[in-house]
Amino acid sequence: VDDLDTPTLVIDLGRVERNIANMAGLAARHGIALRPHVKSHKVVALARMQLEAGATGITCQKLSEAEVMADAGVTDILIAAQIVGPIKVQRLADLAMIVKLTTVVDSVEGAQAIGAALKSRGLELDALVEVDLGFQRCGVAPTDVGEFATRLAAIPGLRFAGVMGYEGQIYSGAHIGDVAAEAERAYERLDIALVSLARVGVVPRCVSVGATAAARLASLHPGITEMRCGSYIFNDLTQVAAGSALLEDCAATVLSTVLSIARRRSAVIDAGAKALSLAQTPGRPGYGLVLGHEASTIKRLSDEHGIIEVHGGPFRMGERVHIVPNSHTTLVNEFSEMVGVRDGRVEEVWPVAARGCIQ
Amino acid sequence: VDDLDTPTLVIDLGRVERNIANMAGLAARHGIALRPHVKSHKVVALARMQLEAGATGITCQKLSEAEVMADAGVTDILIAAQIVGPIKVQRLADLAMIVKLTTVVDSVEGAQAIGAALKSRGLELDALVEVDLGFQRCGVAPTDVGEFATRLAAIPGLRFAGVMGYEGQIYSGAHIGDVAAEAERAYERLDIALVSLARVGVVPRCVSVGATAAARLASLHPGITEMRCGSYIFNDLTQVAAGSALLEDCAATVLSTVLSIARRRSAVIDAGAKALSLAQTPGRPGYGLVLGHEASTIKRLSDEHGIIEVHGGPFRMGERVHIVPNSHTTLVNEFSEMVGVRDGRVEEVWPVAARGCIQ
């Protein structure tokens, strides 16, 4: 590790292996399918490790991520975001030719466009209806799910497979102190959706939810058949704040060098907004935790500099520090590769194959 | 443009050409060297356009950016950040063998390490002393510059070339409403540095400052010989807030598609934190301006979704919108290519060659 240039994204292999095993164990104990979200790492080798640990497939957020993972041999992929527009719908249909693909929809118009493309190729695609679990992003209202599923059933080229939702509001500043209560409220909305389906006589094969910090609750909640958690693989300060990880579960750090100590009570490192990203942790000041300097705060980020307000022991010129990030998901998108380390030695150098898969 | 998949980074070529010509004209009228910062675009073709318009060289923020630009044939490069650590110092020395390179220093220790590497190759490298102009990032205090330059002169392998500073505080929330006054305060600190140099009898060949929004003031300020502005090439909402650009000077937009209008007074687009970045504009809510929907606000960003609070006219499913970003510098790092457009037609597809040049 001492020979690595900085900034570098460093992965603690022991922690990653433990994190993967723990989540796989939780899902297995409760008989729930685990379909990890690979936007959390964007690395083919890590997706394979998750599949080997028992994952039934993977989740992607972008079509281009799914294309990368399909090229690498992953065969069962859910794209957990609406696919809209003629170019993307054609790409989706192309991908459906080569892997077991599942799509999500929350509009009849969107579903019809996808169905038409699939039908013209003689295919039928599994579709999950997205339900708004209170995150207020995409998704139909829980009470409308039954009617929507009925309309979906009439669209050629699509096959209703169930419902999915993302309980992302648990990570918001308003709720991060009480994740369990907020997750319960999200799953009450899910229950309403399931009642709405039952009213029209539709049985969902798959009932899928998403967030790592709610995984224990989700695994106990009746009706949920699948979890799409991603963050658990690396964790970060947001997961620590949400109570779902300890600092020693955080597997991804940015190794950085102190560039300047010219000003008193200040140190400048070579990791800025283009390395750490500007993501924040609700209720926590700064842009990451500097290990060994826990009293200090990364106060500001320029594009390529982090400016640390020093409390406690001083920093040395050229000192190399490990930073636990606020969010690993924006972080992994900033690096072309990540380095897997065990006992201070580099064991793996993984290309972040799906980095920048923006379309 | 209608055939482009989304999200895509779209560049208005007419605006870019005008922005380049205007800044080149300002520098030429005042007899000041312009050394544009290429972190603002990371594109070889745009660096060439700036050089053809009269730039004396380019500025990079990272060694790896400089390596990319040198490979592409750029011959005169300033790296405007401290180069620290044995790996980077060797790379710096390698690069100094093939281009006219200038480095910046703010510590004797850092300068000695660079000097030793250069001297061992029989080279001498131009070094600028970084002065803290009030941004409180890197740089020695203005009153200490004379003494520091004297010590620098005694280090073999380095040649004192002058001073540089970055007046980045003008973009902070506290100052963005009165950029001129804050820039004047920054240049008063620069004057103190020049007095400090004069006291020890040292004449700086180069006196270099940085920010686009201060360029008019810098061009009038006695003693300043070089401007490293970068933002002017594309501009963004931060430049608009700083009063240095109009909305019609903003040349970079993100083309995005509406994915979901399932909730009332809300629209979800396919550009999130991994496209627009989480950069904000002081005093302005949201994560960018949606052209044609100026009353609406991009209220939240997930990794791959932007959530718009709709005011005024509604959004349509599948509608394609152009978004003016808060900050173009974090933005360009999110895209592998950018598309140059004129009169609604694609003329150029440029790889963002220095994207992710993090080390």
Image (tube, coloured by chain):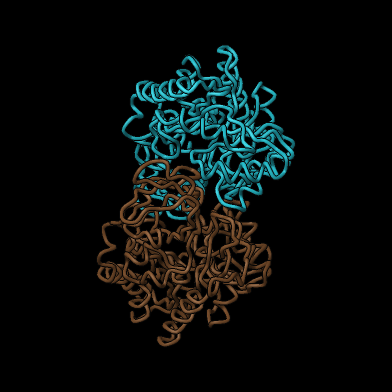
Chain colours: A cyan, B brown
* Residue B121 at x, y percent in the picture: 68, 64
Residue furthest top in the image: A29
Q: Is residue A9 left or right of residue A243?
A: right
Query: In this orientation, does residue B345 appear?
Result: yes
Residue furthest front in the image: A154
* Residue A318 at x, y percent in the picture: 52, 48
The image quarter in which residue A111 lies: top right
Q: Is residue B286 left or right of residue A89?
A: left
* Residue A269 at x, y percent in the picture: 47, 49
Q: Is residue B329 left or right of residue B353?
A: left
Taking depth in this image into account, of A58 and B5 the one nearest to the observer is B5
Taking depth in this image into account, of B234 and A337 the one nearest to the observer is B234
Query: In this orientation, does residue A4 appear?
Result: no
* Residue B165 at x, y percent in the picture: 40, 66
Taking depth in this image into account, of A103 and A357 the one nearest to the observer is A103
Above or below residue B157? Residue A149 is above
Tell me what residue is drawn at x 38 percent, y 59 percent.
B289
Tell me what residue is drawn at x 53 percent, y 79 percent.
B55
Q: Quadrant of the N terminus of chain B?
A: bottom right
Above or below residue B15? Residue A221 is above
Taking depth in this image into account, of A113 and A317 the one nearest to the observer is A113
